[in-house]
């Protein structure tokens, strides 16, 4: 395949050309309660070519190799048209030339597991909550296999496979007009073994969704809170992480000024990192879709902004180092700046010490959707516990937290020494990234606004 790709781009007269070919297979099984709603595998393949000519940068996606000559011609013409009509000329940061093949070492290849066994496992987990008459479910198994080949006119040639498996779903409980729900998810990027022997996770979430029917709604107000690793990760990803993606702020002068390297944004104890190189984690990859080696990137260190996530284009634009964070959903799209594994760095507090420091407040667990508007955010949580005198008390429901990013970064006053990254992901910035991963330790945050009953 490398010979074919080299041959295609060798015909183009430009400052830079790259081409990515990808074969993709997606298996999905969906259960609505005990009924099979969907079961099957879809396969496809295609190409994305990018051309830089005289400062004009263009991309074209196509699926048939017979269309390659036409696609390359259109892409070159578009790059020349952009160059003639744009004052802002694109440059690409210099990167090392790489020739490498990376096939992940899986602890059980999902391709060796029959679809019958995958269905049987999904039905087994689904049956755990369905033993209760007042619970309904929507559960699904997903498996995405991407075999990627990348060639550039600079000489880089990379083959890398990404294999992602997961089981996720929603459990819904009812008592009269009261309806509660929780989410459950297991999986990862290092093999099918992650899906086996996970009954405890489904049993735990089943108990919670039933207990929520008896829980009191939270009373709205301002609380000091402990966030569990999932809530910590969602805050880090949604409220802070997207502002660390260079392509989202490059044309916003006020945000560029606010997110200036060296700016003091958070408490001295706070360090935020994005690291796609952590092995066996959902967000792992070795090279991004520009052929750039992924690297651990400090974004916030001791409360000070020290870095951001880049493509080759944005790194040149900002005059900052490349980071290997330019990723595409699949062969239908050119890559854009994305997070890998983003997290708050653990510190020194045990969970018991965090509870003691909290005294009175809330312990909030597991994200449940949300939104951001500029530097302000609102997130739902699946459940929480009241904390009094450092002791966990009654279960609470209907949790929503809101706040301002910069104030919240300053209000993180203690950080746990535990650490956990998400097993299932998903970020919809422009394209879907199913391997977008977040997490961290438990953290203590003061003065958090909680929506609820008066």
Image (cartoon, rainbow, N blue to C red):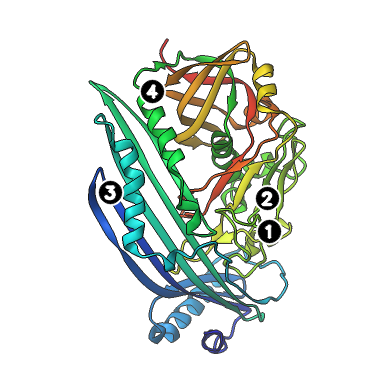
To which residue does mark 4 refer? 211
Question: Between tags 2 and 3, which lies in front?
Answer: 3
Q: Depth check: 130 or 420 in front?
A: 130
Circles 2 and 1: CB atoms closer than 8 Å: yes
N-terminal-most mark, 2 or 1: 2
Instruction: Label 3: state its secondary structure.
Output: strand
N-terminal of the two: label 4 or label 2? 4
Q: Crowding near pointer 1: few (<14 within 10 Å), some, many (20+)?
A: many
- Residue shown at the point (28%, 37%) measured from the top left: 130
- The residue under the point 23% across, 20% down is 176
Compared to residue 45, the image places residue 145 above or below, namely above
Quadrant including the C terminus: top left
> Is mark 4 in CB contact (under 8 Å) with mark 3?
no
Residue at x 57% of width, y 86% of height: 6
Cα–Cα gap, marks 4 and 1 = 45 Å
Task: Look at mark 3 in the image and give the residue it sits on.
Answer: 31
Instruction: Give the label, 4 or 1, closer to the camera.
Output: 4
- Residue 41: % across, % down: 32, 66
Element on which disc 1 rests: loop
Query: Percent from the top left, x then y, of residue 98?
Result: 69, 76
Density class for disc 2 (Cα within 10 Å; few <14, some 14-19, many ≥20) is many
The answer to whether marks 2 and 3 mark residues whose Cβ atoms lie closer than 8 Å is no
Which residue is under mark 2? 308
| Disc on the earlier residue, 4 or 3 | 3
């Amino acid at each position: 395949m490398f010979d074919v790709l080299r041959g295609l781009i060798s015909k183009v007269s430009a400052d830079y050309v790259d081409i990515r070919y990808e074969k993709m297979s997606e298996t999905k099984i969906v259960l609505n309660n005990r009924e099979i709603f969907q079961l099957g595998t879809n396969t496809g393949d295609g190409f994305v070519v990018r051309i830089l000519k005289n400062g004009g940068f263009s991309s074209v996606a196509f699926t048939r190799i017979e269309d390659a000559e036409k696609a390359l011609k259109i892409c070159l013409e578009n790059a020349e048209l952009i160059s003639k009509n744009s004052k802002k000329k694109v440059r690409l940061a210099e990167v090392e030339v790489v020739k490498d093949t990376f096939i992940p070492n899986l602890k059980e290849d999902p391709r060796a597991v029959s679809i019958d066994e995958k269905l049987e496992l999904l039905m087994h987990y689904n049956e755990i909550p369905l033993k209760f008459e007042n619970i309904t479910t929507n559960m699904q198994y997903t498996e995405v296999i991407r075999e990627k080949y990348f060639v550039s006119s600079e000489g880089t040639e990379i083959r890398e496979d990404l294999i992602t498996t997961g089981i996720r779903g929603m459990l819904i409980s009812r008592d009269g007009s009261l309806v509660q729900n929780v989410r459950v998810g297991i999986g990862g990027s290092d093999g099918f073994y992650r899906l086996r022997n996970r009954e405890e996770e489904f049993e735990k979430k089943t108990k919670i969704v039933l207990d929520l029917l008896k829980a009191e709604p939270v009373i709205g107000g301002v609380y000091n809170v402990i966030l569990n690793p999932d809530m910590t990760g969602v805050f880090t990803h949604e409220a802070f992480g997207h502002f660390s993606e260079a392509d989202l702020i490059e044309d916003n002068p006020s945000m560029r000024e606010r997110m200036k390297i060296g700016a003091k944004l958070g408490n001295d104890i706070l360090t935020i990192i994005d690291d796609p190189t952590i092995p066996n984690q959902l967000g792992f990859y070795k090279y991004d879709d520009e052929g750039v080696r992924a690297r651990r990137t400090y974004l916030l260190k001791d409360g000070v902004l020290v870095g951001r996530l880049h493509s080759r284009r944005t790194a040149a634009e900002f005059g900052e180092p490349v980071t290997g964070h330019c990723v595409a959903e699949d062969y239908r799209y050119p890559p854009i700046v994305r997070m890998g594994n983003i997290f708050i760095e653990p510190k020194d507090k045990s969970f018991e010490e965090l509870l003691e420091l909290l005294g009175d407040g809330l312990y909030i667990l597991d994200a449940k959707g949300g939104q951001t508007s500029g530097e302000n955010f609102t997130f739902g949580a699946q459940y929480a516990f009241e904390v009094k005198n450092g002791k966990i008390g009654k279960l609470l429901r209907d949790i929503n937290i809101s706040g301002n990013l910069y104030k919240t970064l300053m209000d993180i006053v203690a950080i746990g020494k535990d650490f956990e990254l998400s097993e299932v992901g998903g970020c919809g910035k422009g394209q879907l990234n199913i391997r977008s991963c977040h997490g961290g330790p438990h953290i203590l945050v003061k003065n958090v606004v909680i929506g609820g009953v008066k």
